[in-house]
Image (spheres, rainbow, N blue to C red):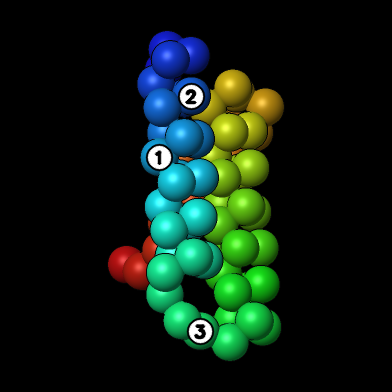
Amino acid sequence: MPLIQVVIVLVVVGVLLWLVNSYIPMAGSIKTILNVVVIIVVVLWLLNVFGLISSLSGIRVGK
């Protein structure tokens, strides 16, 4: 994946997270949990993109 695509995805995720945090009213604890989950998913995705963890491709959810 080219570096420009990685940057575009990070910008889109950041803008979406900012929009959710700014314009959707929800409890502070739920916002915190949402932010942590999104950050963990993005970090795992980045590690997979850069090849630091290749075991993510073998993970299956469901059948």
Q: Earlier in the sequence, mark 2 or mark 1?
A: 2
At x 60% / y 23%, what residue is drawn? 51
Q: Look at the numbered disc 3 and give the secondary structure of its residue.
A: loop
* Residue to which mark 2 is pinned: 7
- Residue 38 in the image: state x and y as whole percent: 55, 57
Q: Look at the numbered disc 1 and give the secondary structure of its residue.
A: helix
Q: Amino acid at mark 3?
A: Met
- Residue 4 in the image: state x and y as whole percent: 43, 15
| Residue 30 left/right relative to 1 | right
Q: State the separation of the CA atoms marked 3 and 2.
A: 28 Å
* Residue to which mark 1 is pinned: 12
* Residue to which mark 3 is pinned: 26
Q: Look at the numbered disc 2 and give the secondary structure of its residue.
A: helix
Q: Residue lying furthest front in this view?
A: 23
Q: State the separation of the CA atoms marked 3 and 1.
A: 21 Å
Residue 28 falls in which quadrant of the image?
bottom right
